[in-house]
Image (cartoon, rainbow, N blue to C red):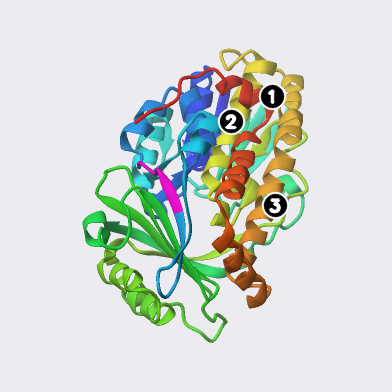
Amino acid sequence: MKVIVVGAGIGGLTAATALRQQGCEVVIFERVSELRPAGSGISLWSNGVKVMNSLGLGKEVAKVGGLMESMSYRKHDDGETYVELGLEPLYKAVHQRAYPISRTQLQRILLEGAGPENLHLSSQVVDYTVTPDGVTVQLADGRTESCDFVVVADGTHSLLRNKICQKVIPRRYAGYVNWNGAVKMSEMKDFVDTDCWTQFVGDGKRVSMMPLGDGEKFYCFFDASPSRGPDIPIPTSSEYKAELRSHFSDWHPAIQRLIEVVDESIISRAEIHDTDPLPTLIDPSGRALLIGDAAHATAPDLGQGGCQAQEDAAVVALLIKKECGGGEGKPSAEALVRVVNQYQDLRAERVAKMVLKARTRGEMTHALNSMAETQAWYEELKTETGANIISGLTKTIEGMPAILKDAVANLPEALP
């Protein structure tokens, strides 16, 4: 069975790895000329780590993932701790710790699993055509390639999403901008614990520091809602620090220090967008489906974007094993129809809920509805014991579909 994966992000590389392990011939087409990760780090929560365990890659993640033992919310100006909670109860409940990880390291691990020889850069897929025997993809440079099945993982700007949905799917501005980068822990050790995910919140803004796996750096990000419009120029990279200083000028000295020492050469600035839940994730022919941001572009407020892409990828591979007997032979058209229909049933509702839940959380965190609502959340944090936060995280992690839950249930935990 030959599968073309469109896109080499987290979802695409996870899909390629999982399908390759099922015996599929995998070809990965990626539009960029150089594979560079977007952003400095990613929170790989326990459900994402469990997918990596199922691929035999959990130990590699544990070797390079960050040791995050607690999380805290602190007041933006005086640094007062609203709530701090240990994450051990979460890790015990879901039988797997989380690992914040450098995107570069995660990409490296997944590319090794997918097979670097299967990756074709500067290869943008712009369309596909279903044929009696399979499907043929068309590339921007005029090339074509045929296969049995297409996994569309070309991200939030997906070119193939409209085709599968049979309508134009607009991206929606989520109301805020995210700047992210990395900073040496030694520069911040006087302000925050090195094994704690620390978030400063206030004025509808947020600043976060999360330990990365080298034991030497924090992944950090800043959220704010700058004015935007056709007459307002987008700042260049040389202006990012000045922009951050203007948005966070009256924040705690820890944040002033963070802005001062964050590595300016790798700061990324992203206007956050999501998409409404899609009418479908599948081509009814059985020859193509959407995964990752192409299927459910999600604001990062739950930290589940990458994890849900990995869940998508794992479910596709498990369904191909179930309905096609794996990827060793040529699948029947009927079997692939069963694959995509079950994928729709297993994934559409879960990822739609993630998109909307992240949107709601983002609106509250960034005071996009009203500052009164956000201020009420700050007050709630003062009386939070941690139980509600742990419960919410547990429900999110444990909500994976049964076929995936069964596949990872008895795997050993990836430990540091």
Numbered marks: total: 3
**Quadrant for the N terminus in the image:** top right
Viewer-closest of 308 and 211:
211
Report x, y in % for residue 310: 54, 36
**Mark 1 to mark 3 CA distance (whole Å):** 23 Å
Circle number at residue 345 = none
Q: Quadrant of the C terminus?
A: top left
Circle 1: residue type: Asp
Q: At which x and y percent is residue 215?
A: 26, 45
Disc 2 to disc 3, C-alpha distance? 21 Å
Query: Looking at the image, do the residues carrying marks 2 and 1 touch, with CB atoms under 8 Å apart?
Result: yes
Question: Magenta span covers which residues?
Answer: 67-71
- Main SS category, magenta section: loop
Label 1 neighbour load within 10 Å: few <14, some 14-19, many 20+ = few
Q: Nearer the viewer, residue 249 or 137?
A: 249
Residue 176 located within the stretch drawn in magenta: no
- Residue 370 spot, x, y in % from top left: 67, 76
